Image: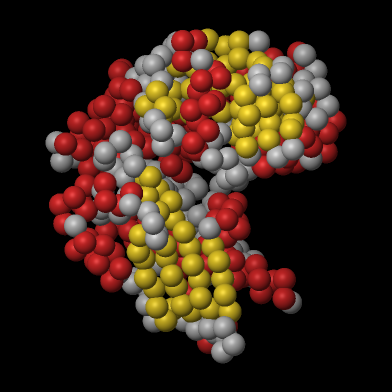
Amino acid sequence: MEIFDAAPHVEVDPAEYTRLLGFPRGHVLEGRVLELASWAREWYAAHGRPWVYARASGDLAIDGDRIRVDGVPFTSARLRGMLDRAGAHGVMLVAVSAGPEIEQEARRAWLQEKPDEYFFLEMYGSAVVEHLTTMTGARLCAWGDGESIAVLPHYSPGYPDWDISEQQALHALIGAEALPGALEVFESGMLRPKKSLLAVFGITRHVDRVQRLSDLVPCENCSYAGCQFRRVPYGRAAPRGGALRRSDATGTGPVYATSTKALKRWADERLTLHTCGDGTINALFRYEGTTCSNMGRRLAFDYRVVLGPRDAGYPIRSQVCRPADGDAGYESMCEYLREGEVLIEQIAREAPLLGRPLDDALSWQRPAIGPGCYCEQEARLHKWGLVLETIHFALMNRETRDQ
Protein backbone atom coordinates (compact mmCIF):
# COMPACT_ATOMS: atom_id res chain seq x y z
CA MET A 1 0.00 0.00 0.00
CA GLU A 2 1.45 3.36 -1.06
CA ILE A 3 -0.04 6.81 -1.69
CA PHE A 4 1.87 9.33 -3.78
CA ASP A 5 -0.22 12.43 -4.46
CA ALA A 6 1.53 15.54 -5.72
CA ALA A 7 -1.70 17.51 -6.17
CA PRO A 8 -4.36 16.47 -3.63
CA HIS A 9 -7.68 18.26 -3.66
CA VAL A 10 -7.97 20.70 -0.75
CA GLU A 11 -11.34 21.78 0.56
CA VAL A 12 -10.91 22.92 4.16
CA ASP A 13 -14.07 22.63 6.25
CA PRO A 14 -15.13 26.22 7.15
CA ALA A 15 -16.01 25.09 10.69
CA GLU A 16 -12.52 23.68 11.18
CA TYR A 17 -10.89 26.87 9.89
CA THR A 18 -13.11 28.94 12.19
CA ARG A 19 -12.04 26.75 15.11
CA LEU A 20 -8.35 27.22 14.30
CA LEU A 21 -8.89 30.97 14.14
CA GLY A 22 -9.92 30.73 17.79
CA PHE A 23 -13.66 31.32 17.55
CA PRO A 24 -16.18 29.19 19.47
CA ARG A 25 -18.28 26.58 17.70
CA GLY A 26 -21.19 27.92 15.75
CA HIS A 27 -19.58 31.35 15.35
CA VAL A 28 -20.39 33.03 12.04
CA LEU A 29 -17.57 35.00 10.46
CA GLU A 30 -18.46 38.46 9.25
CA GLY A 31 -17.00 41.81 8.31
CA ARG A 32 -13.22 42.14 8.18
CA VAL A 33 -12.71 38.65 9.61
CA LEU A 34 -14.78 37.04 6.84
CA GLU A 35 -12.94 39.10 4.24
CA LEU A 36 -9.53 37.93 5.49
CA ALA A 37 -10.62 34.30 5.83
CA SER A 38 -11.97 34.26 2.27
CA TRP A 39 -8.87 35.98 0.96
CA ALA A 40 -6.53 33.40 2.56
CA ARG A 41 -8.61 30.53 1.13
CA GLU A 42 -8.61 32.05 -2.37
CA TRP A 43 -4.89 32.85 -2.24
CA TYR A 44 -4.05 29.25 -1.37
CA ALA A 45 -6.34 27.84 -4.05
CA ALA A 46 -4.39 29.87 -6.61
CA HIS A 47 -0.86 29.43 -5.29
CA GLY A 48 -0.68 26.52 -2.82
CA ARG A 49 1.14 23.31 -3.74
CA PRO A 50 0.13 20.62 -1.22
CA TRP A 51 1.22 17.00 -1.33
CA VAL A 52 0.65 13.69 0.46
CA TYR A 53 2.72 10.55 0.84
CA ALA A 54 2.00 7.29 2.70
CA ARG A 55 3.39 3.79 2.66
CA ALA A 56 2.78 0.64 4.66
CA SER A 57 5.35 -1.02 6.89
CA GLY A 58 4.60 -4.53 8.10
CA ASP A 59 7.81 -4.74 10.12
CA LEU A 60 6.56 -3.64 13.54
CA ALA A 61 8.01 -4.89 16.82
CA ILE A 62 7.19 -3.84 20.38
CA ASP A 63 10.36 -3.98 22.46
CA GLY A 64 9.78 -3.01 26.09
CA ASP A 65 8.96 0.70 26.18
CA ARG A 66 9.97 1.09 22.54
CA ILE A 67 8.56 0.23 19.18
CA ARG A 68 10.63 -0.66 16.14
CA VAL A 69 9.47 0.08 12.62
CA ASP A 70 11.63 -1.47 9.90
CA GLY A 71 14.24 -1.90 12.65
CA VAL A 72 14.26 1.81 13.61
CA PRO A 73 13.53 2.38 17.33
CA PHE A 74 11.09 5.00 18.61
CA THR A 75 10.24 5.80 22.21
CA SER A 76 6.65 6.78 22.94
CA ALA A 77 4.75 5.17 25.79
CA ARG A 78 1.40 6.37 24.46
CA LEU A 79 1.94 5.18 20.89
CA ARG A 80 3.39 1.90 22.13
CA GLY A 81 0.33 1.35 24.35
CA MET A 82 -2.07 2.15 21.51
CA LEU A 83 -0.40 -0.29 19.13
CA ASP A 84 -0.12 -3.00 21.77
CA ARG A 85 -3.76 -2.82 22.89
CA ALA A 86 -4.96 -2.94 19.29
CA GLY A 87 -2.71 -5.88 18.43
CA ALA A 88 -1.23 -3.86 15.57
CA HIS A 89 0.77 -5.83 13.02
CA GLY A 90 2.12 -2.81 11.12
CA VAL A 91 1.92 0.92 10.59
CA MET A 92 1.35 3.41 7.83
CA LEU A 93 4.13 6.00 7.57
CA VAL A 94 2.63 9.31 6.45
CA ALA A 95 3.98 12.71 5.41
CA VAL A 96 1.77 15.63 4.36
CA SER A 97 2.60 19.23 3.54
CA ALA A 98 0.75 22.41 2.62
CA GLY A 99 3.87 23.35 0.64
CA PRO A 100 6.30 26.24 1.14
CA GLU A 101 4.28 28.86 -0.74
CA ILE A 102 1.85 29.81 2.05
CA GLU A 103 4.67 30.07 4.58
CA GLN A 104 6.61 32.36 2.26
CA GLU A 105 3.57 34.55 1.59
CA ALA A 106 2.83 34.81 5.32
CA ARG A 107 6.39 35.93 5.96
CA ARG A 108 6.09 38.58 3.25
CA ALA A 109 2.90 39.85 4.88
CA TRP A 110 4.68 40.09 8.23
CA LEU A 111 7.62 42.00 6.77
CA GLN A 112 5.16 44.35 5.08
CA GLU A 113 3.61 45.00 8.52
CA LYS A 114 0.36 43.22 7.70
CA PRO A 115 -0.17 41.13 10.84
CA ASP A 116 -3.80 40.29 10.05
CA GLU A 117 -2.93 38.81 6.65
CA TYR A 118 -0.01 36.98 8.27
CA PHE A 119 -2.21 35.42 10.94
CA PHE A 120 -4.98 34.26 8.60
CA LEU A 121 -2.46 32.68 6.21
CA GLU A 122 -0.73 30.94 9.13
CA MET A 123 -4.00 29.50 10.40
CA TYR A 124 -5.14 28.47 6.93
CA GLY A 125 -1.84 26.63 6.42
CA SER A 126 -2.50 24.73 9.66
CA ALA A 127 -6.04 24.00 8.49
CA VAL A 128 -4.68 22.57 5.23
CA VAL A 129 -2.34 20.24 7.13
CA GLU A 130 -5.25 19.03 9.30
CA HIS A 131 -7.37 18.53 6.18
CA LEU A 132 -4.66 16.55 4.39
CA THR A 133 -4.14 14.36 7.45
CA THR A 134 -7.89 13.77 7.76
CA MET A 135 -8.30 12.88 4.10
CA THR A 136 -5.27 10.59 4.20
CA GLY A 137 -6.84 8.81 7.17
CA ALA A 138 -10.08 8.45 5.19
CA ARG A 139 -8.19 6.94 2.26
CA LEU A 140 -6.44 4.52 4.58
CA CYS A 141 -9.76 3.55 6.17
CA ALA A 142 -11.21 2.83 2.72
CA TRP A 143 -8.21 0.65 1.88
CA GLY A 144 -8.35 -1.09 5.26
CA ASP A 145 -12.05 -1.85 4.93
CA GLY A 146 -11.35 -3.87 1.79
CA GLU A 147 -8.54 -5.74 3.55
CA SER A 148 -10.49 -6.39 6.80
CA ILE A 149 -8.01 -4.13 8.58
CA ALA A 150 -8.70 -1.33 11.08
CA VAL A 151 -6.72 1.90 10.97
CA LEU A 152 -5.85 3.55 14.30
CA PRO A 153 -5.68 7.29 15.06
CA HIS A 154 -2.50 8.96 13.84
CA TYR A 155 0.31 9.95 16.19
CA SER A 156 3.27 12.26 15.58
CA PRO A 157 6.57 13.28 17.20
CA GLY A 158 5.89 16.28 19.42
CA TYR A 159 2.61 14.83 20.69
CA PRO A 160 2.49 13.86 24.42
CA ASP A 161 4.99 11.09 25.26
CA TRP A 162 6.78 11.31 21.91
CA ASP A 163 9.78 13.59 21.84
CA ILE A 164 9.84 15.87 18.81
CA SER A 165 13.54 15.12 18.29
CA GLU A 166 12.49 11.75 16.79
CA GLN A 167 11.14 13.61 13.76
CA GLN A 168 14.57 13.13 12.19
CA ALA A 169 14.46 9.34 12.53
CA LEU A 170 10.88 9.16 11.23
CA HIS A 171 11.76 11.42 8.30
CA ALA A 172 14.76 9.24 7.43
CA LEU A 173 12.62 6.11 7.70
CA ILE A 174 10.00 7.45 5.31
CA GLY A 175 12.75 8.58 2.92
CA ALA A 176 13.03 12.14 1.60
CA GLU A 177 13.65 10.87 -1.91
CA ALA A 178 10.21 9.21 -1.97
CA LEU A 179 8.23 12.36 -1.15
CA PRO A 180 6.33 14.40 -3.76
CA GLY A 181 7.85 17.62 -2.41
CA ALA A 182 10.85 18.86 -0.45
CA LEU A 183 10.78 18.37 3.33
CA GLU A 184 13.62 19.04 5.76
CA VAL A 185 13.97 18.34 9.47
CA PHE A 186 16.15 20.52 11.72
CA GLU A 187 17.99 19.24 14.78
CA SER A 188 15.26 20.74 16.94
CA GLY A 189 12.73 18.52 15.18
CA MET A 190 11.09 21.42 13.37
CA LEU A 191 9.99 20.81 9.79
CA ARG A 192 10.52 22.99 6.75
CA PRO A 193 8.04 23.79 5.28
CA LYS A 194 6.66 24.18 8.81
CA LYS A 195 3.09 23.57 7.62
CA SER A 196 3.84 19.86 7.30
CA LEU A 197 3.31 16.73 9.39
CA LEU A 198 4.97 13.36 9.83
CA ALA A 199 2.74 10.71 11.37
CA VAL A 200 2.24 7.04 12.11
CA PHE A 201 -1.12 5.30 11.70
CA GLY A 202 -1.24 1.88 13.32
CA ILE A 203 -2.99 -0.92 11.41
CA THR A 204 -4.44 -4.09 12.89
CA ARG A 205 -6.35 -7.17 11.79
CA HIS A 206 -8.04 -7.30 15.21
CA VAL A 207 -10.97 -5.12 14.17
CA ASP A 208 -12.98 -6.30 17.21
CA ARG A 209 -10.45 -4.76 19.61
CA VAL A 210 -10.75 -1.37 17.97
CA GLN A 211 -14.54 -1.50 18.13
CA ARG A 212 -14.45 -2.25 21.88
CA LEU A 213 -11.93 0.44 22.81
CA SER A 214 -13.21 3.88 21.87
CA ASP A 215 -9.83 5.60 22.23
CA LEU A 216 -8.51 3.41 19.41
CA VAL A 217 -11.19 4.62 16.99
CA PRO A 218 -9.95 7.51 14.81
CA CYS A 219 -13.47 8.67 13.90
CA GLU A 220 -13.96 10.88 16.95
CA ASN A 221 -11.04 13.05 15.78
CA CYS A 222 -11.89 12.85 12.08
CA SER A 223 -13.93 15.68 10.53
CA TYR A 224 -14.47 14.00 7.15
CA ALA A 225 -18.26 14.34 6.93
CA GLY A 226 -18.75 12.10 3.91
CA CYS A 227 -16.96 9.02 5.26
CA GLN A 228 -18.90 5.78 4.70
CA PHE A 229 -16.71 3.92 7.23
CA ARG A 230 -17.51 6.09 10.27
CA ARG A 231 -18.06 4.06 13.46
CA VAL A 232 -18.64 6.84 16.02
CA PRO A 233 -19.64 10.52 15.64
CA TYR A 234 -17.05 13.25 15.20
CA GLY A 235 -16.22 14.61 18.65
CA ARG A 236 -16.49 18.27 17.60
CA ALA A 237 -19.64 17.86 15.54
CA ALA A 238 -22.15 19.22 18.03
CA PRO A 239 -22.73 22.99 17.66
CA ARG A 240 -21.86 25.22 20.54
CA GLY A 241 -23.35 28.51 21.68
CA GLY A 242 -21.20 31.54 21.01
CA ALA A 243 -22.05 33.53 24.17
CA LEU A 244 -20.02 32.86 27.29
CA ARG A 245 -22.10 32.38 30.41
CA ARG A 246 -21.88 30.77 33.82
CA SER A 247 -24.28 27.89 33.23
CA ASP A 248 -25.63 25.78 30.39
CA ALA A 249 -29.28 25.51 29.43
CA THR A 250 -30.07 23.37 32.48
CA GLY A 251 -28.58 25.96 34.83
CA THR A 252 -26.23 23.41 36.35
CA GLY A 253 -22.97 23.32 34.43
CA PRO A 254 -20.35 25.82 33.27
CA VAL A 255 -20.04 26.80 29.61
CA TYR A 256 -16.50 27.28 28.32
CA ALA A 257 -15.24 29.07 25.23
CA THR A 258 -12.69 26.26 24.81
CA SER A 259 -13.68 22.65 24.12
CA THR A 260 -13.87 20.56 27.29
CA LYS A 261 -11.77 17.90 25.59
CA ALA A 262 -8.88 20.37 25.24
CA LEU A 263 -9.41 21.64 28.79
CA LYS A 264 -9.26 18.10 30.15
CA ARG A 265 -6.04 17.39 28.28
CA TRP A 266 -4.44 20.63 29.48
CA ALA A 267 -5.62 20.06 33.04
CA ASP A 268 -4.05 16.59 33.01
CA GLU A 269 -0.82 17.47 31.22
CA ARG A 270 -0.05 21.15 31.84
CA LEU A 271 -1.64 22.14 35.15
CA THR A 272 -0.53 21.57 38.75
CA LEU A 273 -2.76 22.55 41.68
CA HIS A 274 -1.61 22.75 45.30
CA THR A 275 -4.02 23.50 48.15
CA CYS A 276 -2.52 25.17 51.22
CA GLY A 277 -3.67 24.71 54.80
CA ASP A 278 -5.71 27.92 54.74
CA GLY A 279 -7.59 26.86 51.60
CA THR A 280 -5.52 29.03 49.27
CA ILE A 281 -4.76 27.35 45.93
CA ASN A 282 -1.50 27.72 44.01
CA ALA A 283 -1.85 26.89 40.32
CA LEU A 284 1.00 26.43 37.83
CA PHE A 285 0.24 26.15 34.11
CA ARG A 286 2.91 25.55 31.43
CA TYR A 287 2.11 27.03 28.00
CA GLU A 288 4.13 25.92 24.98
CA GLY A 289 3.96 27.74 21.66
CA THR A 290 6.12 29.10 18.86
CA THR A 291 7.48 32.47 17.85
CA CYS A 292 5.83 34.27 14.94
CA SER A 293 9.24 34.88 13.30
CA ASN A 294 12.66 33.24 13.10
CA MET A 295 11.25 30.02 11.66
CA GLY A 296 8.82 29.40 14.51
CA ARG A 297 11.14 28.79 17.46
CA ARG A 298 9.55 26.88 20.34
CA LEU A 299 8.97 28.77 23.58
CA ALA A 300 7.47 28.03 27.00
CA PHE A 301 5.89 30.31 29.59
CA ASP A 302 4.79 29.50 33.14
CA TYR A 303 1.56 30.96 34.52
CA ARG A 304 1.38 31.15 38.32
CA VAL A 305 -2.02 31.92 39.81
CA VAL A 306 -2.95 32.18 43.50
CA LEU A 307 -6.64 31.74 44.32
CA GLY A 308 -8.47 32.41 47.56
CA PRO A 309 -10.39 29.54 49.19
CA ARG A 310 -13.43 27.83 47.75
CA ASP A 311 -15.96 29.31 50.18
CA ALA A 312 -14.88 32.80 49.07
CA GLY A 313 -15.52 31.99 45.39
CA TYR A 314 -11.88 31.37 44.43
CA PRO A 315 -10.91 35.06 44.14
CA ILE A 316 -7.82 35.63 42.01
CA ARG A 317 -5.25 37.01 44.44
CA SER A 318 -2.27 37.07 42.10
CA GLN A 319 -1.45 36.11 38.50
CA VAL A 320 1.98 36.25 36.88
CA CYS A 321 3.28 34.98 33.54
CA ARG A 322 7.01 34.60 32.88
CA PRO A 323 9.26 32.53 30.57
CA ALA A 324 9.79 29.01 31.91
CA ASP A 325 13.10 28.41 33.67
CA GLY A 326 15.77 27.31 31.21
CA ASP A 327 13.74 28.23 28.12
CA ALA A 328 15.20 30.85 25.78
CA GLY A 329 12.72 30.61 22.90
CA TYR A 330 11.16 33.95 23.85
CA GLU A 331 14.43 35.67 22.89
CA SER A 332 13.55 35.00 19.23
CA MET A 333 10.20 36.81 19.36
CA CYS A 334 10.20 39.84 17.09
CA GLU A 335 8.94 42.18 19.83
CA TYR A 336 11.61 40.91 22.25
CA LEU A 337 14.26 41.67 19.65
CA ARG A 338 12.95 45.24 19.61
CA GLU A 339 12.14 45.78 23.30
CA GLY A 340 14.20 43.21 25.20
CA GLU A 341 13.39 42.65 28.87
CA VAL A 342 10.93 45.56 28.82
CA LEU A 343 8.52 43.23 27.02
CA ILE A 344 9.01 40.43 29.57
CA GLU A 345 8.31 42.78 32.46
CA GLN A 346 5.21 44.06 30.69
CA ILE A 347 3.96 40.47 30.28
CA ALA A 348 4.61 39.81 33.98
CA ARG A 349 2.61 42.89 35.05
CA GLU A 350 -0.51 41.98 33.06
CA ALA A 351 -3.13 40.55 35.46
CA PRO A 352 -6.45 41.02 33.64
CA LEU A 353 -8.80 39.46 36.25
CA LEU A 354 -6.89 40.23 39.44
CA GLY A 355 -9.22 40.50 42.45
CA ARG A 356 -12.22 38.98 40.66
CA PRO A 357 -13.74 35.52 41.30
CA LEU A 358 -12.55 32.73 39.03
CA ASP A 359 -16.09 32.36 37.64
CA ASP A 360 -15.60 35.69 35.85
CA ALA A 361 -13.18 33.96 33.47
CA LEU A 362 -16.22 32.36 31.80
CA SER A 363 -17.94 35.66 31.04
CA TRP A 364 -14.79 37.66 30.30
CA GLN A 365 -14.92 39.03 26.76
CA ARG A 366 -11.31 38.36 25.92
CA PRO A 367 -9.83 38.25 22.38
CA ALA A 368 -11.09 35.15 20.56
CA ILE A 369 -7.91 34.56 18.55
CA GLY A 370 -4.20 34.79 19.17
CA PRO A 371 -0.97 33.46 17.65
CA GLY A 372 1.38 31.26 19.63
CA CYS A 373 3.81 34.07 20.45
CA TYR A 374 3.59 36.86 23.07
CA CYS A 375 4.33 39.87 20.87
CA GLU A 376 0.85 41.40 20.92
CA GLN A 377 -1.29 42.09 23.98
CA GLU A 378 -4.35 40.47 22.35
CA ALA A 379 -2.42 37.21 21.99
CA ARG A 380 -1.41 37.39 25.65
CA LEU A 381 -4.97 38.06 26.87
CA HIS A 382 -6.23 35.17 24.74
CA LYS A 383 -3.77 32.85 26.49
CA TRP A 384 -4.78 34.11 29.93
CA GLY A 385 -8.32 33.09 29.05
CA LEU A 386 -7.17 29.56 28.17
CA VAL A 387 -5.21 29.28 31.42
CA LEU A 388 -8.02 30.49 33.68
CA GLU A 389 -10.60 28.28 31.95
CA THR A 390 -8.33 25.26 32.46
CA ILE A 391 -7.98 26.04 36.17
CA HIS A 392 -11.76 26.53 36.45
CA PHE A 393 -12.37 23.21 34.67
CA ALA A 394 -9.96 21.34 36.95
CA LEU A 395 -11.46 22.79 40.13
CA MET A 396 -15.04 22.08 39.01
CA ASN A 397 -14.09 18.45 38.32
CA ARG A 398 -12.42 18.20 41.71
CA GLU A 399 -15.52 19.56 43.45
CA THR A 400 -17.68 17.06 41.58
CA ARG A 401 -15.49 14.18 42.74
CA ASP A 402 -15.57 15.43 46.32
CA GLN A 403 -19.38 15.53 46.44
Spot occupied by residue 298 in the image (x, y as percentages of width and height): 38, 45
Which of the two residues, 377 or 43, is positioned nearer the viewer here? Answer: 377
**Which residue shows up at 51% across the image and 76% down it?**
282
Residue 286: image location, x then y, percent: 46, 59
The residue nearer to you, when weighing 346 against 113, is: 346
Q: In the displayed structure, does residue 344 sit left or right of residue 41?
A: left
Q: Which image quarter: residue 112?
A: top left
Residue at (34%, 19%) from the top-left corner? 48
Q: Is residue 78 left or right of residue 184?
A: right
- Residue positioned 34% across, 42% down in the render: 297
Residue closer to the observer: 142 or 167:
167
Point out the image quarter for the C terminus: bottom right
Number of numbered labels in the structure image: 0
Q: Is residue 317 above or below residue 124?
A: below
Is residue 266 something that shows in the picture?
Answer: yes
**Residue 230 placement: quadrant:** top right
Task: Quarter of the image for the N terminus: give it.
Answer: top right
**Can residue 211 be seen here?**
no
From the top left corner, tell me how far across and down residue 215 is, in percent. 72, 41
Q: Is residue 372 left or right of residue 308?
A: left
Residue 132 versus residue 110 in the image, above or below: above
Image vertical order of residue 225 relative to residue 289, above or below: above
Q: Tell me if residue 140 comes above or below residue 159 in the rendering.
A: above
